[in-house]
Image (spheres, rainbow, N blue to C red):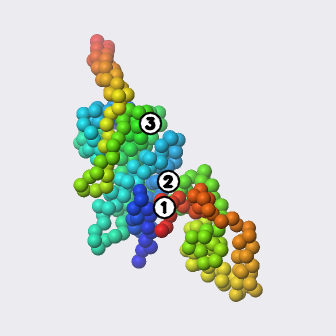
Amino acid sequence: MALDQKFSTIRKGLLEFLILKIVAADKVYVADILSLLGDTEFATQEGTLYPLLGKMRREDLVSYDWQESDTGPPRKYYKLTAAGRKQLAEFNEYWKSLNTFINQAGR
Amino acid sequence: MNKVITVSLNGNAYQMDEDGYNTLAAYLSRAETKLRGSADHREVIADLERSIADKCANFLRPHKNVVSGAEITQILNEMGPVQTPEVGSIESEPSKAEAPPLRSETVIGGSSRRRRLYRIREGSKWAGVCTGMAAFTDMDVSIIRVMFVLATFCAAFFGLLVYIVLIFVLPVAYTESEVAAAHSRPPELRHT
C-alpha cells in the first residue's frame, strides 16, 4: 500500500468530523464546504459530500433550511443539531487523547 | 448533426446530446445502485441532480441550449464518483467519472425495476398499444405505428389483427407505478 493511500484512508474517516466542525462554526451550504476544504488535504467532491451529509442527516447530527439565493436556485443551509454538537465535543476529546497518546507512544 | 435528448433534472428540462445523456444516465444509475441501501437515497440523488443541473446551466447561453457530451464529462469529473460514507466500504478513488457509455435502458433503476408492457392512453391515436410499445422499447412511437400499418397492408391485415388482440391482452397503465413499469427508463431520464 502506497503511503498516500494509507493517509487517504485516515482522511476519509476524519472527513465527517471535519464537516461537523465546519458546520458548527457557521451556517454553510455545500459549495461553502467544498471551497473551505478546497486547498487542503481534505479536498473533496460532491459525489462524496452529498451521500455523507445524507448519512449525517439520517443520524440526526445535522439539519438544514432552504434559503433563497440571489444568483440561482434555493440552497440547503446546514446546521448542527444538539446531537451533532454533542458528537463534535466527544470527537474533540477523543482527538486530543489520541494525539497525546500518539506523541507519547514508544518513548 | 447530433441527436438531442431532453431530460428532466430536479424539475427542470435540460437538453443534451446523446453522448452526454448516456454518460449522465450511467452516472446516475451507478449512484442509485450505490445509495440504494439507505432510507432517504432519493433525497441524496435529488441533491446530486440539483448540483448537476446547476452546472449544466453554467454551460448554457442565449444561443447555446444543448449541453455536449464533453461538458457532461467535465461536470461529472467535478462531481466525482458517488461514494457511500460507510467506513469499510472504502474503495480506491477513480480519478474521473469512469463512464463507458452503457446501454442505459438495461441499467437504469437496476434489475429490481419491474417492467411490463401496458397500453398508454396519453399521446395515443387509438387504444394506446403503440404508445405502450414505444415506452417499453424506448423507440419512437411513429416507427411502431408505421410497422403496424405496413403489417396491415402488406400481410393480409396481420398488423390490425395483432393490434386488436393486444387491445384485449394488454392492460392500460393507470397508476404511477404502472406507468413507471411501462417505461424502459425512469421518469427523470425519459424523453419528453
Report the front residue among B40 and B2: B40
Instruction: Residue A58: give its label.
Output: 3
The residue shown at (60%, 70%) is B121
Label 3, label 2: how far apart the Cα atoms are: 22 Å
Label 2, label 1: how far apart the Cα atoms are: 10 Å
Query: Does B9 appear above or below A52?
Result: below
Residue flagged by tag 1: what amino acid is it?
Answer: Leu
From the image, tell me which residue sits under label 2. Answer: B29
Mark 3, chain letter? A
Residue flagged by tag 3: what amino acid is it?
Answer: Arg
Within 10 Å of disc 2 (Cα), the crowding (few <14, some 14-19, many 20+) is some
The residue shown at (32%, 57%) is B55
Classify mark 3: helix, strand or loop: helix
Percent across and percent down for residue B69 are 39, 64
Q: How many marks?
A: 3
From the image, tell me which residue sits under label 1. Answer: B189
Percent across and percent down for residue B130 are 63, 74
Q: Nearer the viewer, mark 3 or mark 2?
A: 3
Label 3, label 1: how far apart the Cα atoms are: 27 Å
Within 10 Å of disc 3 (Cα), the crowding (few <14, some 14-19, many 20+) is some
The residue shown at (36%, 47%) is A46
Whether residue A41 is visible here, answered yes or no, is no
Query: Does A28 appear above or below B59?
Result: above
Percent across and percent down for residue B91 are 44, 40
Which image quarter is the N terminus of chain A in?
A: top left
Classify mark 2: helix, strand or loop: helix
Residue flagged by tag 2: what amino acid is it?
Answer: Ser
